[in-house]
Amino acid sequence: MSTHPQRPLPLPASAIPDGCAPWSGEQTRHWTRALPPRLVPSRPRTEAVMAVVLLGLGAALMLVAVTDGGVPPVAAAFMALQAVWLVSRPEVVRFTAPTAVVMAVALEPSWPLFLACAVLAGLCARAAETRLAARKRQRAAALAAAGGVTARVPYADSPVTRGKGLAWFGSAVLAAGVAVSVTSGAWDDVVDREGAATAGLYVAGLGLTVLLSAALGRRRALALRREPVPVLRVLVRENADVDAEVFAADDPGALRPLFTVSTLELDDEDQDETQSETEGEGDELDEEELNVLLDRLDDDAPGPLREAVLYGTPYDGAEIVLLAADEDPDEPPVAEYSTGPVRPLSDRTVNRALVKEKRAAAEEGRIEVAAVPKPVTLGRWRAGWPDRLTATAVVLWAGQNLWGETGVWRWGAGGVLALCGAWVLTYWVGWRITADSAGLWFNGVRRTRHIAWDHIRIVRCKGTELRIDSRRATFSEWKAFSLRWRWLERRLGFVHPYERVAAEITAMWKDPAARPTGEIDARERDRRLWPVTLTLLLAWAAALYLMP
């Protein structure tokens, strides 16, 4: 979202189908009002889906454990998958929820367990029906806005690749789940055997779900190409997640996104022939475009707003095609086919994103004020208390896992942890950045690395990560990680050291007058971190030997 109005890049009149109406005003508000209520889970982000998947697996294993085998693994996995199907494939819940109730009756469980299963199945079925009813309302609102105007999608005869990647991934997940379930009999303990069988069946169910998503996505993508589909004029841009963000045609300020959808640009075959004739020039252009894209992604900045024609009927889970103006005004329009379902955005989601954007802007202003660099001969930054706290937490976690172990497990796993941990912990507790008139110097275990001021591409603190990268391909990205509690920082008005480092280095990078005037001496420049690595290895070996 943006609060700064901008003029969208225009779409040539020849690319707009005859009679295509703008999707704006009351028509878009009618479409957004058709969304399901707040309490009904709509199509969530990938992180939320993964959280539901993990919680479902934990619930299935717990159900088998607390009932002492009273619930078979297949029933536990099937019941736990209801939540996954509710957020990803509500179409199947109307069939699976009654099946779960019948399965619970057949098990003859205790009344509390039966009531819990019945209530869970009923809630999932009700929520799924509410989402499906909202889809019908969204579809009807979009059809009414199109006014009966239809057109064939661009490149309708091109091969359809939608669903192929998901099909391969789903097949692999299904095979892995079946393998785990079949080999569950190798466990001696009954609890372990039933837990392995439950986990395997649950993973197999996830694989079938992915295969179903691939089949439905491909079916809807093919339906778009068979006959003319409704068309609407909209505005579109690429958001920070590289997804297409669609706005109403009368929203040049990009204030209220209607939905997002993952898309893939489809190039004309004639462009490939032209590129082969001018390969050198094309490579240079591609590299320039890639750098612009990387800079935009690093800054979490959206792409320019563009006029577009939307082909298809947008609703929760739909497949669409966009014919949008190219970001380069001299290039012809580009066709973008959806590679994922349409994800409508509720008012609550939009407001939450706006609050987050305003909070980030306020924090950025506070950090810039608190981190104004002073003229210095050399700038120095090093690992601080957040890095040492993070390293301590990792060491305690590793020691807890090895405490009380003996023999091969202690020395084998401990040796692997020592080699990996010593390398990582060295940078956590020993990293140092030095700035001089020539650029930035980074110490390392084996060598010191350098970035000239003019070659810096990004200096960014995002979440728990501090990143610095160069435009030169020979320089691998430098990163540092630490624990953070953003809510506590805001409440106390505290500026995290990573934020201060990023702000000070960025000020020097952007303003040559703020850069250090001196030059780093050879002794400080060649300071390596391998003594720290060796010390950590010896300390870990001593801890393994002295552990009870």
Image (spheres, helix red, strand yellow):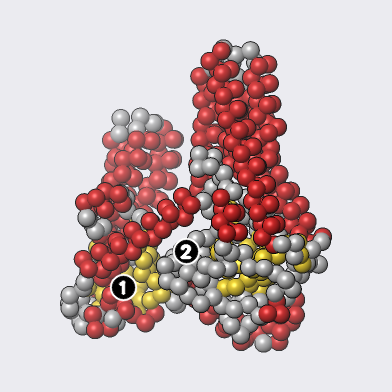
Question: Of helix, strand and loop, which one carries label 2?
Answer: loop
Q: Secondary structure at mark 1?
A: helix
Residue 512 in view of the camera: yes
Quarter of the view holding residue 501: bottom left
Task: Name the residue that disc number 2 marks.
Answer: 255
Q: Quadrant of the C terminus?
A: top left
Mark whose residue sits in front, 1 or 2: 2
Left or right: 292 as drawn, with respect to 384: right
Of the pair 357 and 145, the residue shown nearer to us: 145
- Give, as a three-letter code, the residue at label 1: Thr
Label 2 environment density (alpha carbons within 10 Å; few <14, some 14–19, many ≥20):
some
Percent across and percent down for residue 131 are 61, 42
Look at 35% across and 61% down and name the residue there.
358
Tag count:
2
The residue at the point 28 percent across, 81 percent down is 511
Q: Is residue 396 above or below residue 59?
A: below
3D distance between C-alphas at marks 1 and 2 = 29 Å
Percent x, y for residue 346? Answer: 51, 51
Depicted 532 relative to depicted 211: above or below:
below
Please tell me which residue lies in front, 497 or 416.
497
| x and y, in percent, of residue 240 in the image | 49, 64
> Which numbered disc, 1 or 2, marks the residue that appears first in the sequence?
2
The residue under label 2 is which amino acid type? Answer: Leu
The picture places residue 540, in percent across and down from the top left corner, at 31, 44
- Quickly name the residue at label 1: 506
Residue 362 numbered tag: none
